[in-house]
């Protein structure tokens, strides 16, 4: 894809991870506001404390603390299901049938991007590769497989339990907010939510640190080379320059990771669902639905061209993603979902502009 494609993919990854952080910071502020803590104060405290942990202590310490909160998440999940299963109305799960008046299939289609964002955590792949080593492919595949399977099972189980416990929740609201207000589930659910927010934000900050550090390294390394040449010409010392450069780079990376997401999250609790919907509608689909099949098809075309024929069998490394028709269909279906979201968002945006213009003329 060249430099342009590399820059576009990197930008999408940064937007996706920042959107994830926005949603989790907003959810933390929303939960805290239910305990008489000011929303913006809670968002700031969570963002700065977890940011200080990741960017101040390093990725290794952050990974260990993240593992601890993962254990807390698992224990809270077990307690939640043990207490909630007897209280759930499991008959509500039978309402989602084709002829049921309780199901809005157009609304379900509109929820696909949000659902995709909840299931896709591809932004953590660079961190997995960095921790396990890029040459250790079997361990990477094992980590990705089980790291994807376990959250999928948790999502399915939580969706079923959530419907059984909060089937009458107001559309457009988070059932977690309803269940946190009162009842025996409040304690384990609060622990579960806190652990989920903590692990997601830490993982996202680590991913941002890796991505932004690469970008910052290129910028500061060019500057350091110029400074090194100048100091050598003057017989100066270069040791302090390297230390100062690392400090500036760490500060820049931390600032770019923390402040943009915090500023958006502080707009209000509605940023939680808005960020998830935006991420699922655009970065997720473009990054994991369009870019991979496109890159695979481009590589196959180049390999066939190199061999001097338009068709023919390729090596297993080129065919592991499936046949060309499947890759083309996946890219096409993803672009259709992106187009649907863009049309819906554009229509809503034009509606807001029209109403604002009408109010201005009336005034």
Image (cartoon, rainbow, N blue to C red):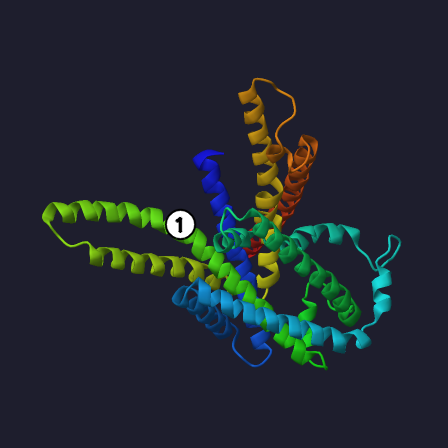
- For this orientation, the residue located farthest to the right is 99
Q: Is residue 104 left or right of residue 3?
A: right
Circle 1 residue: 214
* Residue at (54% x, 54% y) in the render: 124
Rendered view: 262 above or below 308: below
Where residue 309 appears, as percent x and y from the top left, is 60, 18
* Residue at (30% x, 60% y) in the render: 247
* Residue at (70% x, 35% y) in the render: 326
* Residue at (59% x, 47% y) in the render: 282
Q: 172 and 91: which one is in front?
A: 91
SS class, disc 1: helix
Q: Residues within 10 Å of mark 1 (few under 14, many from 20)?
A: few
Q: 302 and 220: which one is in front?
A: 302
Where residue 230 appears, as percent x and y from the top left, is 16, 46
> In this orientation, does residue 216 appear?
yes
Q: 96 and 323: which one is in front?
A: 323
Location of the C terminus (image quadrant) = bottom right
Q: Is residue 295 left or right of residue 106?
A: left
Q: 28 and 316: which one is in front?
A: 316
Rendered view: 334 above or below 106: above
Where residue 352 appears, as percent x and y from the top left, is 59, 53
Where residue 228 appears, as percent x and y from the top left, is 20, 48
Q: Quadrant of residue 288?
A: top right
Rendered view: 319 above or below 89: above
> In this orientation, does residue 118 appear?
no
Numbered circles on residues, count: 1
Rendered view: 316 above or below 120: above
Q: Quadrant of residue 58?
A: bottom left
- For this orientation, the residue located farthest to the left is 234
Q: Quadrant of residue 76?
A: bottom right
């Amino acid at each position: 894809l060249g430099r342009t494609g590399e820059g576009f993919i990197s930008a999408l990854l940064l937007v996706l991870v920042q959107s994830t952080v926005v949603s989790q910071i907003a959810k933390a502020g929303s939960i805290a506001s239910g305990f008489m803590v000011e929303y913006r104060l809670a968002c700031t405290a969570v963002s700065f404390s977890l940011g200080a942990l990741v960017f101040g202590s390093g990725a290794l310490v952050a990974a260990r603390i993240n593992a601890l909160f993962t254990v807390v998440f698992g224990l809270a999940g077990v307690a939640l299901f043990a207490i909630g299963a007897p209280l759930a109305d499991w008959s509500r799960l039978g309402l989602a049938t084709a002829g049921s008046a309780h199901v809005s299939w157009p609304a379900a289609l509109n929820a696909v991007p949000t659902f995709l964002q909840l299931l896709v955590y591809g932004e953590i792949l660079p961190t997995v590769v960095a921790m396990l080593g890029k040459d250790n492919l079997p361990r990477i595949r094992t980590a990705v497989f089980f790291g994807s399977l376990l959250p999928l099972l948790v999502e399915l189980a939580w969706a079923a339990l959530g419907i059984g416990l909060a089937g009458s929740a107001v559309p457009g609201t988070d059932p977690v907010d309803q269940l946190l207000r009162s009842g025996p589930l409040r304690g384990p659910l609060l622990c579960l939510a806190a652990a989920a927010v903590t692990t997601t934000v830490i993982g996202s900050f680590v991913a941002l640190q890796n991505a932004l550090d690469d970008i910052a390294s290129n910028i500061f390394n060019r500057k350091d080379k110029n400074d090194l040449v100048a100091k050598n010409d003057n017989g100066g010392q270069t040791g302090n320059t390297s230390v100062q450069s690392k400090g500036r780079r760490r500060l820049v990376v931390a600032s770019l990771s923390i402040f943009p997401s915090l500023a958006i999250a502080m707009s209000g609790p509605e940023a939680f669902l808005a960020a998830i919907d935006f991420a699922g509608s655009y970065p997720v689909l473009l990054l994991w639905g369009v870019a991979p099949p496109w890159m695979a098809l481009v590589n196959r075309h180049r390999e066939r061209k190199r061999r001097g024929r338009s068709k023919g069998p390729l090596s297993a490394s080129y065919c592991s993603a499936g046949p060309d028709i499947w890759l083309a269909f996946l890219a096409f279906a993803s672009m259709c979902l992106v187009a649907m979201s863009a049309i819906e968002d554009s229509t809503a945006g034009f509606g807001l502009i029209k109403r604002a213009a009408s109010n201005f003329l009336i005034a």
